[in-house]
Amino acid sequence: MTRFTFGALALALPLAASAAPENYTLDPYHTYAHFAVDHFGVSLMWGRFDRSAGKFMLDRAARKGSLELDVETASLTTGDNDKGSRPRSRDEHLRSADFFNVAEFPRMSFKADKVKFDGDNPTEVTGQLTLLGVTRPLTLKMERWVCRDHPFSKKPMCGGNASGAIKRSEFGMKYALPAVGDDIRLYVEFEGYRD
């Protein structure tokens, strides 16, 4: 009986280990938050934040997960940082109190603890986005999700692309409405290494 119990435990251990929650740290060199906004009804303007940090947890067996993402708002770029003969560049204006107010609110954050799965893969993450000191719900849908070993370091990694939408006015960002759109499309491309 003892030999049988020991053998059963030995067989179950690898299964229990593989079902444990997995923690990942986001790679700041391959994780970016982007946004798109309608500009005068003519074009869609794009912006990106170059500096972010965060982590996520997956428990595939329990169908649970969590995500924390912090974005440095001053790292915003839209490709227009040279003011030339203008009073300020577009990026400077977006960093001002009219828009992201980076002096007072140097970070925006997304914290989520509701994850929907399709099999072992997350398909949707729901949580709270804090921007300009206001916190509101946000759902990000996974458009791509891949887990594999890094081809060079061989470290386990997961990543992909996710998107969602907000109304900037709901966070108090009302400058230039409605000429500059209220609906903001959010995109996050991310890669994380298992801790």
Image (spheres, rainbow, N blue to C red):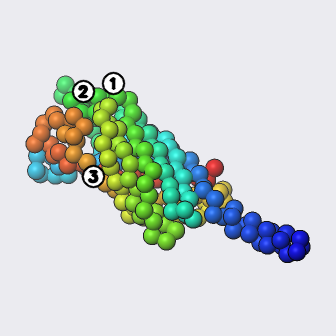
Mark number displayed over residue 58: none
* Residue closest to the eye, 114 or 192: 114
The mark lying in front, picked from 2 and 3, is: 3
The span from disc 3 to disc 1 (Cα, nearest Å) is 24 Å
The span from disc 2 to disc 1 (Cα, nearest Å) is 8 Å
Q: Quadrant of residue 78?
A: top left
The span from disc 2 to disc 3 (Cα, nearest Å) is 22 Å
- Residue 89 at what x, y percent from top left? 24, 32
Which sits earlier in the primary sequence, circle 2 or circle 3?
2
Left or right side of 96 for 148: right
Mark number displayed over residue 97: 2
Q: Are marks 2 and 1 in contact (CB under 8 Å)?
A: yes
Q: In the rendered view, tell whether residue 25 sits above or below residue 145.
A: above
Mark number displayed over residue 104: 1
Q: In the rendered view, tell whether residue 172 sits above or below residue 162.
A: above
To which residue does mark 3 refer? 165
User: SS for tag 1?
Assistant: loop
Left or right side of 18 for 110: left
Residue at 25% x, 37% y: name it. Answer: 171
Residue type pointed to by label 1: Glu
User: SS for tag 2?
Assistant: loop
Q: Quadrant of residue 79?
A: top left
Residue at 88% x, 74% y: name it. Answer: 1
Q: In the rendered view, tell whether residue 110 sits above or below residue 162.
A: above
Q: In the rendered view, tell whether residue 171 sits above or below residue 23.
A: above
- Residue 168 at what x, y percent from top left? 22, 41
Within-10-Å neighbours for mark 1: few <14, some 14–19, many 20+: few
Which sits earlier in the primary sequence, circle 3 or circle 1?
1
Which sits earlier in the primary sequence, circle 2 or circle 1?
2
Residue type pointed to by label 2: Ala
